[in-house]
Amino acid sequence: MKNLNFMFFHGLGLLLLTTIFAATSEGSDLFGSAPEPKGPVLLLETFEHESKTNWIHSSNSKYSGVLQVSADDFGGHGLEVPFKARHYGSSIPLLEPLEPWKGFVFQYELTLKAGMECGGAYVKLLTHSPTLNLALLDGDSPYTVMFGPDKCGTTNKVHLIFRHQSPLTGEWEEKHLDKPPLMKLDNLPHLYSLVVYPDNTYQVLIDNEVSKEGSLFEDFTPPFNPPASIPDPSETKPVDWVDKVQISDPAAVKPDDWDEEAPAQIEDEVAEMPMGWLEEEPLMVEDPEAEQPGDWDVEEDGEWEAPKIKNPACVSAPGCGKWKRPMIPNPAFKGKWSPPNIPNPDYKGPWAAKQIPNPNFFEDKEPLKSIGKIGAVAVEIWTMSHLYSFDNFLASYDEDVADDYAERTWKLKFEAGSAKAEEAKQVKENASEENFDAAKTLRSVVGAVLPGLLAPLEDLMEKVDPLAVLVALVVGPLLLIFLLAKLVFPAKKTKKTANSETPTEDKEEKEEDKEEEPEDKKDQ
């Protein structure tokens, strides 16, 4: 019944997946041409044609890695990172410079085919200038926004960094998003979107769901606008300033009955040696199957000793070797004595320098006008991971255009990929249940008939599929019995005699020959 249920839901899953694929084959880059956006865009890169790309690879020799347009799992193509341990640098211009103060949306898809060990999957929205030359792209190329996932070791974040120019000094400074969201690490296609609004608020979305939102003035470090006052850098804390809240009680004395030497644990005097404990048996014994190597030289190598293995006699016993009482916490243990803390009578509170006006203070009420126009999109990364791909880059002033395009592209791929992943999960879970049942049956049978073989059986099932072991143990003896029966009782051969019947076909042939005899021969 379990197998029938599995076959039913397996078939249902395949039918659902096929239906999704069929439904998405129109107007989608899954199985046909990429759909047209329903509004104006400044960039739309779908990598629809595998042999053609508008991306410009940097001529800088640092970028030994070359991004490749390759097929995805959904009938389309993406820009793939093919090799590990390389710098990659490629970019594509916008149709016209994007003015951030008008508000804009930028989004792209990312698919990790082989996970992400250590590498960047972010993009840089390069600052527009008359001298911008994408063929000369490098790590110092000015950018307006850096956005997207980055993962290495324990670092996992979706970057959002603005480069802002001080209206006071003209210097550029990076503004990093506080507490950025985490990137997705499965192998499904995920959509990363940035929406910046004219009122200086923002949203970071993952799979069209808001992961982080807030104000440019509140959520970035260092802040877009510096504080109006700062601590006086010329001031230092007085030497006699006491900022310690508590001190040890100088009047406290260690009690007479305080035993600092008492151990933390003692033997359990109530415990008894378990029944069946083999005190005479060592935990390790020499391997009886080991043999001295033929090239062993006693003079150079010393006396040969067989390697030690776990004592087979201890497998079914509660223990071997000399039994020792277990240790328990010592109720008399108190540890090293120290005086209790009391409030510090000289405490003055935390010290802080007095505030003075910030000489670098400014108030930029429209910071989006001080980050520069966006002229191109660049993938400029160093990575120790590979086989992850970018797709469907889109930049627009209209958020609805981006949402609609995502619904007709990314969402269809995500749903199809999720259905396929769920199907694979069900297959794996079903196989795991079958293996568990097989292992349980094997333990029961072997434990009842040959309990001494349980330990070797466990070792075998760690290396080989328990279901395969069970089938081998059942089919193997049956096959052996069949072969033995064939040897002991060979099939009897039919002996022909003079009076034996002729086979039917031969008999019929003779009758036909008889009918064809000439008439004159019949008259004779």
Image: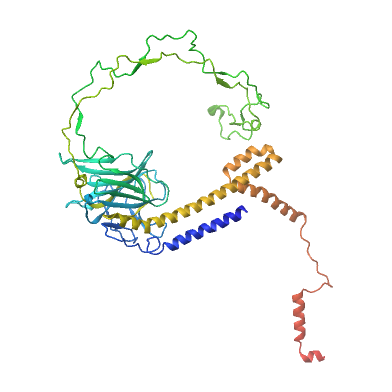
Residue 462 visible in the shown view: yes
Residue 490 location (% of width, % of height): 76, 58
Q: Locate residue 335 relative to residue 201 in the image: left or right.
A: right
Q: Residue at x 74, y 79 (%)?
A: 509
Q: Locate residue 66 relative to residue 95 in the image: left or right.
A: right
Residue 73 location (% of width, % of height): 42, 57
Observer-nearest residue: 212 or 67? 212
Res. 55 image quadrant:
bottom left
Q: Residue at x 81, y 73 (%)?
A: 501
Q: Residue at x 44, y 54 (%)?
A: 417
Q: Locate residue 414 relative to residue 62 in the image: left or right.
A: right
101 relative to 226, above or below = below
Residue 323 location (% of width, % of height): 62, 22
177 relative to 255, above or below = below
Res. 160 image quadrant:
top left
Residue 427 location (% of width, % of height): 54, 52
